[in-house]
Every structure is written in C-alpha cells, then in structure tokens.
Image (cartoon, rainbow, N blue to C red):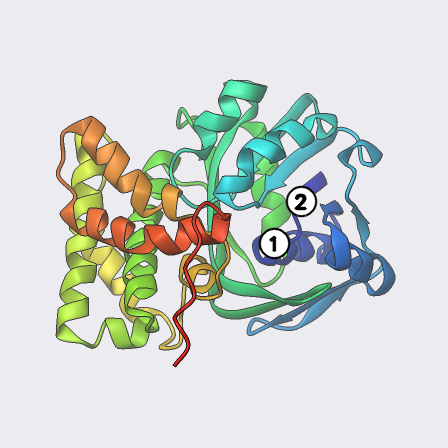
Amino acid sequence: MRVAVFAAGAVGGYFGGRLAQAGEEVAFIARADHLQAIRERGLRVDSVAGDFGVHPADATDDPGQIGPVDCVLLAVKTWQLPQAVEQMGPLVGKDTFVVPLLNGVESPDVLAEVIGKERVLGGLCRILARVAGPGHIQHTGVDPTVTFGELDGSHTERTERLLAAFDRASGVSAAIPDDINVAIWEKLLSVASIGGVGAVTRAPVGVNRSVEQSRALLEAAMAEIAAVARARRVPLPQDAVEAAIKFMDALPDHGRTSLQQDIAEGRRSELDAWNGAVVRLGREAGVETPVHAFLYASLLPQELRARGDVGFPESPAG
C-alpha cells in the first residue's frame, strides 16, 4: 500500500515506521528539525517491542510532493485537525481513505464534513510514546495497537487491505472491531479520565490508581463518560467501566498521557477534545458530568496560557 503519515510525531512515526519496516510504501509529513533529521539520518524508533530504523525515509513538509495515496494515517493533535484537513488535499485521490488516529470522538465527523463521509474511517490507537528528539521516537510502554473500521460497521476490501498491511508489520497488533464507534468511546473513557486526573494531580498513573481518593475520582470520571455515551445511543458494553479500570491497572507505574505531559510542560493540549468534550457532549445529551467539569475548569487556565490567550502575572520580588 502507498500510505501517507500526517504527521510523523510519536504516534505517526511509530505506526508509519512499522509499516515502512514491513515493506509498505510510506511517506512521512514532518516539519522543522524533525523533518531535517529524518531526511538526513532516517527515522529512529527506540521501542520496548524492539528498536528499529527507517533509512532512507521519504519525508517532506509538502503533501503536494507526495500526491494521492491509498491511505492517509492522520496522527496530529485534535486542535491541529482543521489545519491538517486543509493541507492534506493533494494526498486525497478518488479512492483514498483517511484513518484518524486522534484522541477524542469527534474527528471522523470533522473530516467527513470536508472530504466526504465515504473517504473516512474511524480509528484509534493505544501506545505510550514520545518524540525524544529530532528524527527520534521513543516507545516507552503499552503494547502498540491500532484499531479501525468503517463508520457504518460494514466490512470492506480497503479495511482488509490495511489490516493485512499491519499484520505484516512487527510490533503492532491491529484489529477491525464490530463497531468502531464503540471502540472510540471506550478509548475516550480511559484516556480522558486518566489524562484529566493525572494532569490535575501531576502524578503518574501508578500513584493515582493506588491512592484511594484519586482512584475514586478516576472511577467516577469513567462512569460519567459511559453515561454520556449511552445517552448518545452508543451501545457500550455493560462492563465498559470495569474493562477500563482493568486496562488502567495494567499500565506502567510511570505512565502519563500526552495531555498530562503537554499541560505539565506548558504546551497546548487536547483538553477541549478530552474532558471538555465530555462536558459539552454530556450537556447536549442531558447528562451531568461534575467530575469532568471540575477537571476541565481546573486545567483551563493552564491551557489558555499555553495558547497565549491569558498571561500569568509575575510574583512580586521579595
């Protein structure tokens, strides 16, 4: 398959790199120092599932140099999605399909409004990874999985082709679920709860799940998301919260979500698409979400500061 990875950050770099390692024709969209390093030295991935590199690597900051592809793996932050959709036009041909590996539950709808629902799959991934430096991805935990499917639940030749491509790759488990919409909400149930609580407590998941009070907060946050999903007619399994708790308990003690890391380091985060979305979608469905309202309100000042919308005054000397 000819695959474009937009963009080659921690998620795109890892999963796109595994496809390239397996022999698929992969082009990476990157920028600045990261792009320069990939062009000069290739893409380096240090992984608990086995280190590897892609060299030479096809990388550019101009989608027009790549042209139409079979599949676009979209791996940007949720707040970067509108700009990415504008820029990815040259990658989208008559038979191109796009798989968003973004957090949150709203990305497929955003994409469908611009490029057409027929070109959009639902997708998600699970991995703990980061960009350790220019051209360097570090996978630190969680067995890497990628899940995708048609939004209407049908099985198609294009999803089977992509599944076969991932099955040829090492260090990745891939699956097509019965209902990708359920799978996307199940991930939100975990990541928004773990990320929001972790960002507020500034503690890793191993601490938050072991302290009675923060564990109770995590479980209440998960229950709120399950209630919102069901109110919106998403048929979550009855044990969805229990499954999320089991997943959380299996995470490495040091685990921190991308939202937690971004807020701690003063970067713009996906707060609006995680905890903010739970509050917003819950309000639309008539479901109260006091835990997520608290998490969102507590983290919003830091988020606004990272965006440059508010400034924090300096403390007086002395």
Camera sees residue 241: yes
State the SS at label 2: strand
Q: Is residue 224 left or right of residue 263?
A: left
Which mark, by number, is residue 248? Answer: none
Instruction: Find residue 213 and report its horizontal and vertical position in percent.
Output: 13, 70
Q: Which residue is mark 1?
A: 15
Instruction: Find residue 309 and report its horizontal and vertical position in percent.
Output: 46, 45
Closest to the observer, 296 or 210: 296
Q: Earlier in the sequence, mark 2 or mark 1?
A: 2
Q: Quadrant of the N terminus?
A: top right
Instruction: Find residue 131 and report its horizontal and vertical position in percent.
Output: 61, 64
> What amino acid is found at the position of numbered circle 2 in the picture?
Val
Instruction: Find residue 121 and report its horizontal and vertical position in percent.
Output: 50, 31
Q: Which residue is mark 2?
A: 5
Asked if the residue under mark 1 is in contact with the one under mark 2, i.e. CB atoms within 8 Å, the reply is yes
Q: For the point 30% across and 47% down, which residue is it? A: 275
> What amino acid is found at the position of numbered circle 1 in the picture?
Phe
Closest to the observer, 290 or 228: 290
**Res 251 quadrant in image:** bottom left
Q: Quadrant of the C terminus?
A: bottom left
Q: Is residue 141 left or right of residue 87?
A: left
Closest to the observer, 281 or 184: 281
Q: For the point 21% across and 60% down, which residue is it? A: 218
Q: For the point 74% across and 66% down, which residue is it? A: 53
